[in-house]
Image (tube, grey):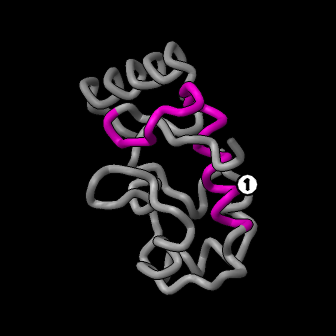
């Protein structure tokens, strides 16, 4: 348990901020994909363990150098994923999109905290 009051208060404020902005599950680009209790497929699926081993560890890893969500083909090529991982890619996109609301047609970027829903 942390006894530092600054850290404890910062965590409490962060929880409040994520609740106000309706971002309780996905609140940072450093959010882990694997072993994340808010993302059940990341806990149970061996696919996400494979992703982790290949370098896909956080939400940020799904974005390119221009801060735009990569297509599955781009992620597949960059990290050496299998075409069989496409369903897991959709699950990861859905996880992010359930907490981040953006308007259809907006460009998905890190800056706006949004990811365009893969099914739009």
| Residue at (68, 58) in percent of width and height | 90
Residue that label 1 marks: 40
Image quarter hosting the N terminus? top left
Viewport quadrant of the C terminus: top right
- Residue 9 is situated, as x and y percent measured from the top left of the image, at 33, 21
> In the visual, does 106 lie left or right of 87?
left
Residue 36: name its quadrant. Answer: bottom right
Q: Residue at x 53, y 78 (%)?
A: 76
Q: Judge whether 119 appears above or below 58 on screen.
A: above
Query: In the rendered image, which quarter is residue 117 located in?
Result: top right
Residue 83: where, in percent of width, then height? 66, 81
Give the answer, above or below, for where 47 lies relative to 26: below
Region of the chain picked out in magenta, as a range: 87-111
**Residue 62 included in the magenta stretch of the image:** no
11 and 85: which is toward the camera: 85
Give x and y (percent) for residue 74. Answer: 47, 72
Q: How many marks?
A: 1
Q: Secondary structure at mark 1?
A: helix
Q: What residue is rendered at 43% in x and 18% in y?
A: 17
Q: Nearer the viewer, residue 79 or 36?
A: 79
Badge 1 local density, few (<14 within 10 Å), some, or many (20+)?
some
Establish if 114 lies above or below 18: below
Q: Nearer the viewer, residue 78 or 36?
A: 78
Q: Which residue extends farthest top?
A: 20
Task: Answer with left or right where residue 55 lies relative to residue 41.
Answer: left
Name the outermost residue toward the front. 105
Q: Which residue appears at 41% of the width and 62% of the height?
A: 61
Residue 109 part of the magenta-drawn span: yes
């Amino acid at each position: 348990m942390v006894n530092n009051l600054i850290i404890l208060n910062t965590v409490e404020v962060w929880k409040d901020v994520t609740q106000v902005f309706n971002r309780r599950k996905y609140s940072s680009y450093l959010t882990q994909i694997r072993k994340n209790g808010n993302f059940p497929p990341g806990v149970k699926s061996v696919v996400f363990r494979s992703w982790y081993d290949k370098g896909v560890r956080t939400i940020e890893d799904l974005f390119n150098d221009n801060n735009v969500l990569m297509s599955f083909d781009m992620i597949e090529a960059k990290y050496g994923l299998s075409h069989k991982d496409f369903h897991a890619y959709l699950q990861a996109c859905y996880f992010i999109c359930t907490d981040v609301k953006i308007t259809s047609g907006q460009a998905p970027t890190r800056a706006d905290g949004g990811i365009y829903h893969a099914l739009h």
